[in-house]
Image: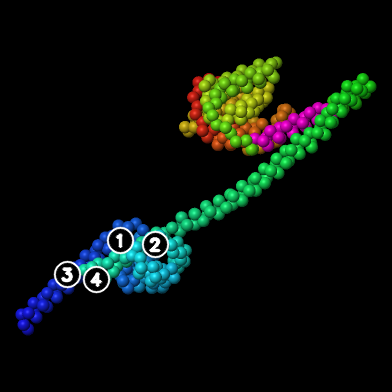
Amino acid sequence: MQAHDVSQQLKRHEQELVIRRDIQDAREYAENIVETVREPLVVLNSELRILTANQSFYHTFKVTPEDTIGNFIYDLGNRQWDIPKLRVLFEEILPHDTVINGYEVEHDFLDIGRKVMLLNARQIFREKIGSHIILLAMEDITERKYADEEIERLNFDLAERAVDLEAANKDLETFNYTVAHDLRQPLNVMSLYCQSIKFICGDQLKEECLGYVEEAHKATVGMDRLIGALLDFSRLGRVEPHHETVDLGRVAHEVAQSLQLTAAERQVEFQIGEEIVAIGDPGLLRVVLDNLLGNALKYSACRAKAVIEFGVREIRGIPTYFVRDNGAGFDMTHADQLFIPFQRLPGAQDNKGFGIGLATVERIIRQHGGQVCAESEPDQGATFYFTLAAAGARSSTPKP
């Protein structure tokens, strides 16, 4: 063999070693990239055979390296990867675009069920090797996809309910109009007739008959008050609270002064903290205190001296307002009935009112994004607590 031929052979051998080294470098380079990616990722050659894959791929798709490396991608898992959209990606799209991002593929896999994958593919040409490799990253968006679909469905249902609610509100307005005019009008006529009979014929009626007329008149007045309470309760559902800073201590003092005028014969002590500040609708929060303080006064009538307290304290970092009394109290087993319209606790039937005050309180507090609850024991008084979503409070609440 001539020296020239030997030289050529050595040169070709050196070139082959360089190419093998470059191939090995490329493989290590690809493997290092693959293992640093958290999502499932594979590297394929130009024939779509898998050169390497990361641990996330094996874990996600329940396969082993022995079943993966060197295999045609469509043959993986008994040809489970022979997916039409995947063929479109590799055979029609990728040959023209070297980078593909956000390509969605949905498929039912035998071992792991239905998966929605977002694929990112990139072609890389290694000049020294003279071949292409393809990086294919897969993001599992199954849960996100289904969550988006569920949100879309819920939004659709919500829109339908909004339409239904609007229709219901219109029906309610119609009903309110009917109540206000068609029901109150005959009541007013009956009340007028009762008063007229008493005024014109009072001295001619027997005492028993006159009593019937007076009871009929009282019933019409009571019914008119009940209709008014129903209308007020109904209107509350359509009122949008106006939020501003409210001095609840001052409002409570004003409510207490009015209540004391209605109970001048009783011994009542109101203990009201100063500078109790909240964020809410002044008019609606006055209604809350009207009802809570009024209830406290009503149910403490059994005491020689009623003590009613209004204050605020922080519970788990939230300003919590309270009205406490030393009255009759109630059994907590019936507490779930407190805020239901027209529900009365056992033993409360003899008290005046329609059983709508606490329901009104609950509705207003809910409109303010807060909560209301109560705690009590029979004959140990009661305490009602409420919070407001946007509340800030500072208080010098007196101790009972």
The location of residue 47, given as percent across then percent down, is 32, 73
Badge nearest the viewer, 4 or 1: 4
Report, in whole angstroms, how far the alpha carbon at label 2 lies from the one at label 4. Answer: 26 Å
From the image, which quarter does the C terminus lie in? top right
Numbered disc total: 4
Res 119 label: 2
Q: Is residue 19 above or below residue 363?
A: below
Mark 3 and 1 residues: CB-CB less than 8 Å, in contact?
Answer: no
Q: Please, what secondary structure does the residue beneath circle 2 have?
A: strand
Considering only order in the chain, which callout, 3 or 2, is on the residue closer to the N terminus? 3
Res 34 label: 1
**Going 69% across and 19% down the picture, which residue do you hit?**
262
Crowd class of label 3 (few under 14; some 14 to 19; many from 20; radius 10 Å): some
- Quickly name the residue at label 4: 130
Badge nearest the viewer, 2 or 4: 4
Q: Please, what secondary structure does the residue beneath circle 4 have?
A: loop
Q: Is residue 346 left or right of residue 111?
A: right
The location of residue 171, given as percent across then percent down, is 70, 44
Crowd class of label 1 (few under 14; some 14 to 19; many from 20; radius 10 Å): many
Determine the image quadrant of residue 39. Answer: bottom left
* First to last magenta residue range: 216-236
Report, in whole angstroms, how far the alpha carbon at label 4 lies from the one at label 1. Answer: 21 Å
Mark 2 and 3 residues: CB-CB less than 8 Å, in contact?
Answer: no
